[in-house]
Amino acid sequence: MRQVQELYNNKKREAKEAIKLIEDGDSICVPLGVGEPPTILTALSEQRRDYHNVKVRQPYPIHKYGYFDPNTVENIQHVSWFLSSTSRQGAKEGWIDVIPSSFFGIPKLINDGYVACDVAITMVSPMDKYGYFSVSLSPDYTMAAIAKAREVIVEVNPHVPFANGDNKVHISQISALVESQDPIMTIPLPTIGPVHKAIAEYVADFIKDGSTLQIGLGAIPDSVLMLIEDKQDLGMHTELVTDALMHLYEKGALTNRKKNFMPGKMVATISLGSQKLYEFMDHNPMLEMHPVSFTNDPNIAGLNDNLIAVNGSLEIDFLGQCNSESIGPVPFSATGGQQDFSPCSLIV
């Protein structure tokens, strides 16, 4: 135990020192959403003019850091696998690169070297007594990035939950660590209007007792969950865990008892929600967070009978073909994980 604490102390740095491990020409992999490490990325932004030809690869960024700057793309450029409101305008103007990819496929692209990953930077939970941190908020492709990277820099935050599942990194794998105390960014439940509710009422009829759910992000999927709290023995094998799914569990509808694969377990790869959700995740024996190569593998998800995926879309034509990526010729998001569950999806 003393040895792992000594390793921890030896690797502790200020953010401005930790980022000195980054070299010109490096490709940096950063988790999506609330898993991004704000202290480290802020320091990188402040020092961005010291670098040349560095790429930050990340889908769905939350904060607009200083390197989101058309005037410094020769120093640090953001490369997106999935656009958000933070990156959408830069992609439209052409100074942010967009590389659409199936969410499920990103770890393989990293493992096989098709996507460079010289440095992995992520937020983690505090270290346990055995020297392990939990990459609980976004293990998705982050675990593949950690395994591939030359340097691994982590931001240790006491507000990050320690979750069960394949999302652990050991102190011996880490090049440098930075401590922060800032609250994790929270994502409130979307505002649900009468149109959302009307659509959700139709969709909810397709969900029967004992179904296993994959739920996407947005007002309509969350509306559906609010309308099925009287169902029994629902299960969860999903990409995203949210407050709405936690609400189903608290109402007694989400038991996971009828799942064929991993019965009794809620399975996910990313989390977006409230501080209450992050507290719910901490050491919860019912919840496991795994890489997206596991959660979104159709062969694994399909082991559950009655798997129903509810995801939002932008457009649908009279033939039932859905568009969830662009508005006209302009990219709006990207491929993401929706197609991984498309054989069993309800697109709304």
Image (tube, rainbow, N blue to C red):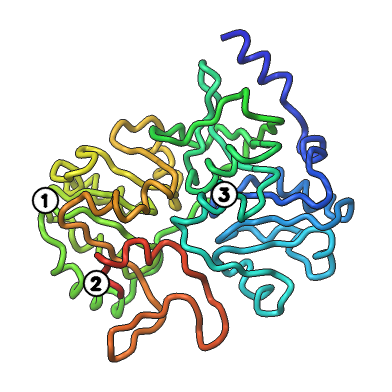
Within 10 Å of the Cα at label 3, are there few (<14), some (14-19), or many (20+) other Cα atoms? few
Q: Residue at x 31, y 67 (%)?
A: 342
Rounded to the nearest whole Å, what is the CA distance between mark 2 and mark 1?
Answer: 18 Å
Q: Which mark is residue 301?
A: none
Quadrant assignment, res 39: top right
Image location of residue 246, percent across then percent down:
31, 48
Q: Amino acid at mark 2?
A: Ala
Image location of residue 225, percent across then percent down:
25, 60
Labels 3 and 2: the sequence-earlier one: 3
Q: Amino acid at mark 1?
A: Gln
Position of the C terminus by quadrant: bottom left
Mark 1 sits on what residue?
232
Mark 2 sits on what residue?
200
Q: Residue at x 39, y 84 (%)?
A: 315
Q: Residue at x 39, y 34 (%)?
A: 165
Rounded to the nearest whole Å, what is the CA distance between mark 3 and mark 1?
Answer: 42 Å
Q: Is 252 on the left or on the right of 44, as rendered?
A: left
User: In front of the other: label 3 or label 2?
Assistant: 3
Within 10 Å of the Cα at label 2, are there few (<14), some (14-19), or many (20+) other Cα atoms? many
Q: Which mark is residue 112?
A: 3
